[in-house]
Amino acid sequence: MTRRWVESAAFILAVVVLRLLAATWRFQVRQGGHLRAARESGAPLVFALWHSRILPLLYHHRHQGIVMLVSRHRDGGYLTRLGARWGFPSVRGSSGRGGDVGLLGVVRTLGRRAEVAITPDGPRGPAERVKPGIVAAAQHTGALLVPVGARTAWAWWFRSWDRFCVPRPFARIEVVYGEPFAVPPGKPAAREAAERLQRQLHAVTHGP
């Protein structure tokens, strides 16, 4: 057996286990009116979430046609394949730099009034710190930023840079949406938006 075959088989097994695990999770939505208002606005949307909460939020929003910005790191390849199985198209790149190829792909996608999900602290941290790319994408396209978090007290926490969260079987997960907002033109507005997004992401992930 080749190494590639072994990795492929291991990935398929992991996907099956994750699917069985996720089917036991119980979701409760908080502040869902923010999401409804954002979608009813007709503007393109940028969902912002911390890297550690990818898994429960990915499952909760499966098959909604949301596009993911995924890093070109090897781990990003696994996430792309998992996302494809759960109905997420992807753009490969980084959320860190305004001129990044991946970010340009996001901007093009948003120009088609799509919904895009970005982890502004990915792919390698620092954890829970907003990088400028997500704000640049929203500012250049007139998209609304929609902070979203997942809270659970019953989970495994990996010893990774982001303390990656895997909810345990039958975990109760609160999905919390922050107030959507646009980013006006100009550097001062971009800085203020990044600070606002930082505060809102902390609130929806950890509580006020």
Image (cartoon, rainbow, N blue to C red):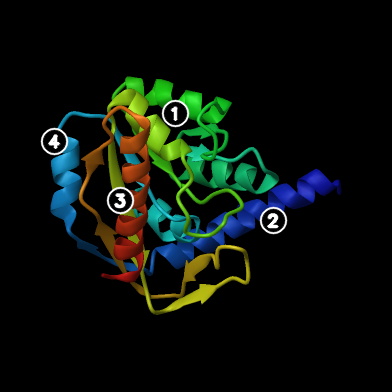
Q: Residues within 10 Å of mark 4 (few under 14, many from 20)?
A: few
Residue 183, compared with residue 168, is above or below; it is: above
Q: Residue at x 32, y 58 (%)?
A: 199
Q: Earlier in the sequence, mark 3 or mark 2?
A: 2
Point 37% across, 42% down: residue:
191
**Mark 4 → mark 3, Cα distance in angstroms:** 22 Å
Instruction: Kindly identify which numbered label has been placed on residue 106.
Output: 1
Mark 1 or 2 closer to N-term?
A: 2
- Provide the residue designation for mark 2: 10
Q: CA distance from mark 3 to mark 1?
A: 21 Å
Q: Amino acid type of disc 1?
A: Val
Residue type beneath disc 4: Glu
In depth, the one of 146 and 190 nearer the eye is 190
Q: Secondary structure at mark 2?
A: helix
Q: Could you tell me which secondary element the residue under label 1 belongs to? A: helix
Q: Quadrant of the C terminus?
A: bottom left
Image vertical order of residue 65 relative to residue 158, above or below: above
Q: Residues within 10 Å of mark 3 (few under 14, many from 20)?
A: few
**Upstream in the sequence, badge 4 or badge 2?**
2
For the residues marked 1 and 2, what is the alpha-carbon distance in whole angstroms? 30 Å
Rounded to the nearest whole Å, what is the CA distance between mark 3 and mark 2? 41 Å
What residue did someone put label 3 on? 196
- First along the sequence among labels 3 and 1: 1
Tag 3 or tag 4, which sits nearer the N-term?
4
Amino acid type, residue under disc 3 in the picture: Arg
Tag 2: Cα neighbours inside 10 Å, few (<14), some, or many (≥20)? few
Q: Which dot marks residue 40?
A: 4
Disc 4 from disc 1: Cα separation: 21 Å
Nearer to us of marks 4 and 3 is 3
Are the residues at dot 1 and dot 2 in contact (C-beta closer than 8 Å)? no
Is residue 67 in view from this perspective?
no
Disc 2 residue type? Ala
